[in-house]
Image (cartoon, helix red, strand yellow):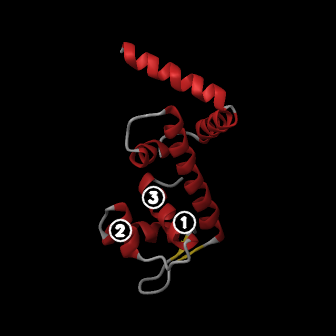
Amino acid sequence: MLSPSSEDYLEEAYRLSVNNKDIRIKDIADCLNVSMPSVVKGLRKLNRLGYIVYKPYEKIELTDRGKVKGVFLVERNKILRDFIEIIGSDCDIEQEAEAMEHYLTISTIKAIEKLVKFFSENEDLLLEFSNFKTESELHD
């Protein structure tokens, strides 16, 4: 099982690879607001675990295992961002999704995904929830 920081490094490496960019330590560090030595340490761990191929001063590549996990990490983040948006939370959606994603089980993520899909396919119920939320906030 990957630590939250390892997941973050892999998720960003995957995002860079999808955008047809070289995976660079500096880009990961800048995106995650961490030091380059921290990224190097994380990439070494991901390399040992078989998620990437990393050798200093060479191109960083995702393995098939890394790509599969990267897809999962990106999708998980999107599901949580969609959920936060649907419930109308007044927060920084990206930060909130990031805070949630490492601590929820796959079962909970799948349940949230179903709830998001349910509300997106039943806009009348989403509107009803939104109205309920607004009325509740007036009485709080």
- Sequence-first disc among 1 and 3: 3
Q: Tell me residue 73's x, y (percent).
A: 56, 55
Find the residue positioned furthest to the left.
35
Find the residue positioned furthest to the right.
121
Q: Residue at x 59, y 40 (%)?
A: 109
Q: Tell me residue 106's x, y (percent).
A: 61, 42
Name the disc covering residue 104, or none.
Answer: none
* Quadrant housing residue 129: top right
Q: Residue at x 51, y 78 (%)?
A: 21
Q: Residue at x 47, y 46 (%)?
A: 102
Where disc 3 sits, the SS reads: helix
- Taking the image as shown, residue 115 lies to the left or right of residue 32, namely right
Q: Nearer the viewer, residue 54 or 134?
A: 134
Find the residue positioned furthest to the bottom.
57
Question: What's the CA distance linking mark 1 and mark 3?
Answer: 15 Å
What type is the residue that disc 2 sits on? Ala
- Taking the image as shown, residue 18 lies to the left or right of residue 88, namely right
Name the disc covering residue 29, or none.
Answer: 2
Question: What's the CA distance linking mark 2 and mark 1?
Answer: 20 Å
Residue position marked by numbered label 3 in the rendering = 8
* Disc number lying in front (1 or 3): 3
Name the disc covering residue 49, or none.
Answer: 1
Q: Tell me residue 13's x, y (percent).
A: 49, 68
Q: Nearer the viewer, residue 115 or 6?
A: 115
Q: Tell me residue 83's x, y (percent).
A: 54, 39
